[in-house]
Amino acid sequence: MLSIIIPWKNRDEVYRSISRAVVVADELGGEVILVNYSGSLNVSRLPSSRRLRVVEVDGTRYFNKASASNVGAAYANHPLLFFCDCDILLERDVVSECSRLARAPRTFVTVAHVQEESLNSLGTTHIRCFGYHMTIKTQDDLEVQIVDFEEDTSTGLRNAPGLLFVKRDDFVRINGYGGFLHGWGWEDQDMICRLTLGLNLQREQYGTLTHLSHDDRARLSEYPAVENRWESRDRMFRTALARYDRNMFRGTWTEDVKAHSSRERAEL
Protein backbone atom coordinates (compact mmCIF):
# COMPACT_ATOMS: atom_id res chain seq x y z
CA MET A 1 0.00 0.00 0.00
CA LEU A 2 0.98 3.59 -0.67
CA SER A 3 1.31 6.86 1.25
CA ILE A 4 0.96 9.89 -1.04
CA ILE A 5 2.70 12.85 0.60
CA ILE A 6 1.94 16.37 -0.69
CA PRO A 7 3.93 19.30 0.79
CA TRP A 8 2.01 22.58 0.56
CA LYS A 9 2.00 26.26 1.38
CA ASN A 10 -0.54 28.72 -0.04
CA ARG A 11 -0.98 27.22 -3.51
CA ASP A 12 -4.58 27.23 -4.78
CA GLU A 13 -3.87 24.41 -7.24
CA VAL A 14 -4.24 21.92 -4.38
CA TYR A 15 -8.00 22.50 -4.29
CA ARG A 16 -8.20 21.11 -7.83
CA SER A 17 -5.69 18.28 -7.43
CA ILE A 18 -6.48 16.89 -4.00
CA SER A 19 -9.75 15.16 -4.93
CA ARG A 20 -8.00 13.18 -7.67
CA ALA A 21 -5.27 12.19 -5.24
CA VAL A 22 -7.85 10.95 -2.72
CA VAL A 23 -9.66 8.91 -5.40
CA VAL A 24 -6.40 7.25 -6.49
CA ALA A 25 -5.45 6.54 -2.88
CA ASP A 26 -8.85 4.97 -2.26
CA GLU A 27 -8.61 2.77 -5.37
CA LEU A 28 -5.12 1.59 -4.40
CA GLY A 29 -5.81 1.14 -0.68
CA GLY A 30 -3.51 3.98 0.32
CA GLU A 31 -3.63 7.38 2.00
CA VAL A 32 -2.97 11.03 1.20
CA ILE A 33 -0.98 13.15 3.66
CA LEU A 34 -1.25 16.88 2.94
CA VAL A 35 1.47 18.77 4.82
CA ASN A 36 0.41 22.37 5.50
CA TYR A 37 3.75 24.10 6.03
CA SER A 38 2.38 27.12 7.96
CA GLY A 39 0.05 28.13 5.15
CA SER A 40 -3.53 29.41 5.19
CA LEU A 41 -5.42 26.25 4.31
CA ASN A 42 -9.15 26.42 3.58
CA VAL A 43 -10.20 23.07 4.98
CA SER A 44 -13.78 23.52 3.75
CA ARG A 45 -12.49 23.14 0.16
CA LEU A 46 -10.91 19.75 0.85
CA PRO A 47 -12.79 16.48 0.23
CA SER A 48 -14.09 14.64 3.25
CA SER A 49 -12.45 11.23 3.17
CA ARG A 50 -10.93 8.76 5.58
CA ARG A 51 -8.08 8.51 3.05
CA LEU A 52 -7.05 12.16 3.56
CA ARG A 53 -4.97 13.31 6.52
CA VAL A 54 -3.79 16.88 7.07
CA VAL A 55 -0.58 17.56 8.99
CA GLU A 56 -0.10 21.10 10.30
CA VAL A 57 3.43 22.49 10.67
CA ASP A 58 3.56 25.64 12.78
CA GLY A 59 5.95 28.57 12.94
CA THR A 60 7.76 28.53 9.58
CA ARG A 61 8.23 31.74 7.59
CA TYR A 62 9.35 30.31 4.25
CA PHE A 63 8.41 27.14 2.44
CA ASN A 64 10.97 24.34 2.46
CA LYS A 65 9.71 21.50 0.29
CA ALA A 66 12.35 19.07 1.53
CA SER A 67 11.58 19.66 5.21
CA ALA A 68 7.83 19.55 4.61
CA SER A 69 8.23 16.22 2.80
CA ASN A 70 10.28 14.86 5.68
CA VAL A 71 7.64 15.82 8.23
CA GLY A 72 4.95 14.19 6.10
CA ALA A 73 6.91 10.95 5.91
CA ALA A 74 6.91 10.73 9.70
CA TYR A 75 3.11 10.37 9.58
CA ALA A 76 3.03 7.78 6.77
CA ASN A 77 1.50 4.37 7.53
CA HIS A 78 2.58 2.44 4.45
CA PRO A 79 5.85 0.86 3.24
CA LEU A 80 5.90 2.76 -0.08
CA LEU A 81 6.04 6.56 -0.20
CA PHE A 82 5.01 8.76 -3.13
CA PHE A 83 6.12 12.38 -2.84
CA CYS A 84 3.89 14.47 -5.09
CA ASP A 85 3.57 18.19 -5.81
CA CYS A 86 0.30 19.96 -5.05
CA ASP A 87 -0.30 20.92 -8.70
CA ILE A 88 -0.39 17.42 -10.23
CA LEU A 89 -3.51 15.59 -11.43
CA LEU A 90 -2.96 11.93 -10.59
CA GLU A 91 -3.99 8.98 -12.75
CA ARG A 92 -4.60 5.58 -11.22
CA ASP A 93 -2.80 3.58 -13.92
CA VAL A 94 0.38 5.69 -13.76
CA VAL A 95 0.51 5.65 -9.96
CA SER A 96 -0.19 1.92 -9.86
CA GLU A 97 2.57 1.05 -12.34
CA CYS A 98 5.12 3.35 -10.69
CA SER A 99 4.27 1.73 -7.37
CA ARG A 100 4.81 -1.73 -8.85
CA LEU A 101 8.18 -0.75 -10.31
CA ALA A 102 9.31 0.87 -7.06
CA ARG A 103 8.73 -2.34 -5.09
CA ALA A 104 11.56 -4.06 -6.99
CA PRO A 105 14.81 -4.49 -5.01
CA ARG A 106 17.30 -1.60 -5.07
CA THR A 107 14.94 0.57 -7.11
CA PHE A 108 13.21 3.92 -6.86
CA VAL A 109 10.97 5.54 -9.45
CA THR A 110 10.15 8.99 -10.74
CA VAL A 111 7.31 9.86 -13.09
CA ALA A 112 8.91 10.37 -16.51
CA HIS A 113 7.07 13.49 -17.66
CA VAL A 114 4.39 15.98 -16.86
CA GLN A 115 2.12 17.47 -19.49
CA GLU A 116 1.46 21.17 -18.99
CA GLU A 117 -2.24 21.98 -18.87
CA SER A 118 -1.50 25.15 -20.86
CA LEU A 119 1.07 25.18 -23.67
CA ASN A 120 4.06 27.53 -23.24
CA SER A 121 3.26 28.09 -19.58
CA LEU A 122 6.45 30.14 -19.12
CA GLY A 123 5.71 32.48 -22.01
CA THR A 124 8.94 31.97 -23.96
CA THR A 125 9.27 33.50 -27.42
CA HIS A 126 12.08 32.15 -29.61
CA ILE A 127 13.39 29.26 -27.44
CA ARG A 128 11.22 26.16 -27.79
CA CYS A 129 12.93 24.03 -25.13
CA PHE A 130 15.85 24.35 -22.73
CA GLY A 131 17.52 21.47 -20.91
CA TYR A 132 20.78 19.97 -19.70
CA HIS A 133 22.42 16.59 -19.18
CA MET A 134 24.61 16.28 -16.07
CA THR A 135 26.79 13.36 -14.96
CA ILE A 136 28.31 12.98 -11.48
CA LYS A 137 30.78 10.16 -10.78
CA THR A 138 32.29 9.29 -7.41
CA GLN A 139 35.58 7.68 -6.42
CA ASP A 140 33.78 4.41 -5.62
CA ASP A 141 32.63 4.17 -9.26
CA LEU A 142 29.02 5.14 -8.73
CA GLU A 143 27.41 7.41 -11.27
CA VAL A 144 24.22 9.44 -11.54
CA GLN A 145 22.85 11.17 -14.60
CA ILE A 146 20.45 14.06 -14.34
CA VAL A 147 18.65 14.85 -17.56
CA ASP A 148 16.42 17.84 -16.98
CA PHE A 149 14.53 20.01 -19.41
CA GLU A 150 11.93 22.73 -19.22
CA GLU A 151 8.65 22.55 -21.07
CA ASP A 152 8.85 21.89 -24.80
CA THR A 153 6.46 24.52 -26.08
CA SER A 154 5.45 22.37 -29.05
CA THR A 155 4.28 19.44 -26.90
CA GLY A 156 3.85 20.80 -23.35
CA LEU A 157 6.05 18.01 -21.95
CA ARG A 158 8.83 18.36 -19.40
CA ASN A 159 10.68 16.20 -16.87
CA ALA A 160 9.17 15.32 -13.49
CA PRO A 161 12.05 14.61 -11.06
CA GLY A 162 9.98 15.67 -8.07
CA LEU A 163 7.33 12.94 -8.41
CA LEU A 164 9.17 10.27 -6.46
CA PHE A 165 8.25 6.73 -5.39
CA VAL A 166 10.60 5.25 -2.79
CA LYS A 167 10.38 2.45 -0.28
CA ARG A 168 10.11 3.72 3.28
CA ASP A 169 13.11 1.62 4.31
CA ASP A 170 15.30 3.32 1.70
CA PHE A 171 13.93 6.73 2.65
CA VAL A 172 14.94 6.05 6.26
CA ARG A 173 18.38 4.72 5.27
CA ILE A 174 19.23 7.93 3.40
CA ASN A 175 17.54 10.00 6.17
CA GLY A 176 15.04 11.58 3.81
CA TYR A 177 15.18 14.79 1.87
CA GLY A 178 17.84 17.44 2.38
CA GLY A 179 16.33 20.23 4.44
CA PHE A 180 19.69 22.03 4.24
CA LEU A 181 18.61 23.19 0.76
CA HIS A 182 16.72 26.47 1.05
CA GLY A 183 14.73 27.83 -1.89
CA TRP A 184 13.37 26.42 -5.12
CA GLY A 185 15.11 24.28 -7.67
CA TRP A 186 17.36 21.35 -6.66
CA GLU A 187 15.77 19.44 -3.78
CA ASP A 188 14.23 16.88 -6.15
CA GLN A 189 17.40 16.24 -8.14
CA ASP A 190 19.33 16.13 -4.87
CA MET A 191 17.18 13.25 -3.64
CA ILE A 192 17.80 11.38 -6.90
CA CYS A 193 21.55 11.96 -6.56
CA ARG A 194 21.68 10.83 -2.94
CA LEU A 195 19.58 7.68 -3.45
CA THR A 196 21.85 6.76 -6.38
CA LEU A 197 25.26 7.76 -5.02
CA GLY A 198 24.54 7.20 -1.34
CA LEU A 199 22.59 3.93 -1.51
CA ASN A 200 23.52 2.63 -4.96
CA LEU A 201 19.88 2.37 -6.00
CA GLN A 202 18.68 2.32 -9.60
CA ARG A 203 16.21 4.86 -10.91
CA GLU A 204 13.30 3.88 -13.14
CA GLN A 205 11.03 6.35 -14.92
CA TYR A 206 7.49 5.79 -16.10
CA GLY A 207 4.38 7.61 -17.24
CA THR A 208 3.00 11.09 -17.78
CA LEU A 209 0.77 13.14 -15.50
CA THR A 210 -0.88 16.54 -15.96
CA HIS A 211 0.66 19.62 -14.36
CA LEU A 212 -1.63 22.53 -13.51
CA SER A 213 0.29 25.30 -15.24
CA HIS A 214 1.30 28.47 -13.43
CA ASP A 215 3.87 31.25 -13.65
CA ASP A 216 7.05 31.82 -11.65
CA ARG A 217 5.30 34.19 -9.25
CA ALA A 218 3.25 31.27 -7.92
CA ARG A 219 6.31 29.00 -8.04
CA LEU A 220 8.53 31.29 -5.95
CA SER A 221 6.08 33.25 -3.79
CA GLU A 222 6.67 31.35 -0.53
CA TYR A 223 10.47 31.16 -0.79
CA PRO A 224 13.11 33.76 0.19
CA ALA A 225 13.25 36.52 -2.44
CA VAL A 226 15.55 35.98 -5.42
CA GLU A 227 16.01 37.79 -8.71
CA ASN A 228 14.85 34.70 -10.59
CA ARG A 229 14.48 30.95 -10.05
CA TRP A 230 17.82 30.17 -11.71
CA GLU A 231 19.60 32.08 -8.95
CA SER A 232 17.92 29.85 -6.37
CA ARG A 233 18.58 26.62 -8.26
CA ASP A 234 22.25 27.45 -8.81
CA ARG A 235 22.84 28.18 -5.12
CA MET A 236 21.12 24.96 -4.05
CA PHE A 237 23.05 22.90 -6.59
CA ARG A 238 26.40 24.29 -5.41
CA THR A 239 25.48 23.52 -1.79
CA ALA A 240 24.52 19.95 -2.68
CA LEU A 241 27.57 19.33 -4.88
CA ALA A 242 29.91 20.40 -2.09
CA ARG A 243 28.26 17.82 0.18
CA TYR A 244 28.63 15.06 -2.42
CA ASP A 245 32.32 15.89 -2.72
CA ARG A 246 32.66 15.29 1.03
CA ASN A 247 30.85 11.95 0.71
CA MET A 248 27.87 13.36 2.63
CA PHE A 249 24.67 11.82 1.34
CA ARG A 250 22.39 11.74 4.36
CA GLY A 251 19.35 13.97 4.43
CA THR A 252 17.70 15.69 7.39
CA TRP A 253 14.57 13.63 8.06
CA THR A 254 15.19 12.93 11.76
CA GLU A 255 16.42 16.48 12.35
CA ASP A 256 13.41 18.05 10.61
CA VAL A 257 10.91 15.94 12.52
CA LYS A 258 12.51 16.98 15.82
CA ALA A 259 12.87 20.64 14.85
CA HIS A 260 9.32 21.25 13.60
CA SER A 261 6.22 21.56 15.71
CA SER A 262 3.64 19.47 13.83
CA ARG A 263 0.32 17.78 14.51
CA GLU A 264 -2.34 15.94 12.58
CA ARG A 265 -5.59 17.83 12.22
CA ALA A 266 -8.20 15.93 14.20
CA GLU A 267 -11.03 16.38 11.69
CA LEU A 268 -11.62 18.00 8.31
Image (cartoon, grey):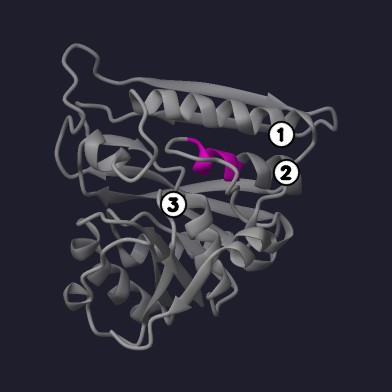
Q: Is residue 21 magenta?
A: no
**Residue at point 24%, 42% (across, down):** 218
- N-term-proximal mark, 3 vs 1: 3
Disc 2 to disc 3, C-alpha distance: 20 Å
**Residue at point 60%, 62% (across, down):** 259
Q: Quadrant of the C terminus?
A: bottom left
The residue pinned by badge 2 equals: 249
Bin the neighbour count of mark 2 within 10 Å (Cα to Cα): few under 14, some 14-19, many 20 and up. Answer: many
Kind of element beneath mark 1: helix
Q: Amino acid at mark 1?
A: Arg
- Using the image, tell me which numbered label, if any, was put on residue 220: none
**Residue at point 38%, 81% (across, down):** 265
Can residue 171 be seen?
no
Locate residue 56, reporting x and y percent.
41, 71
Q: Amino acid at mark 2?
A: Phe
Write the start and end of the magenta stretch as one range. Answer: 186-192
The residue pinned by badge 3 equals: 163
Name the magenta segment's main secondary structure: helix
Bin the neighbour count of mark 3 within 10 Å (Cα to Cα): few under 14, some 14-19, many 20 and up. Answer: many
Does 54 appear above or below 227?
below
Q: Is residue 190 magenta?
A: yes
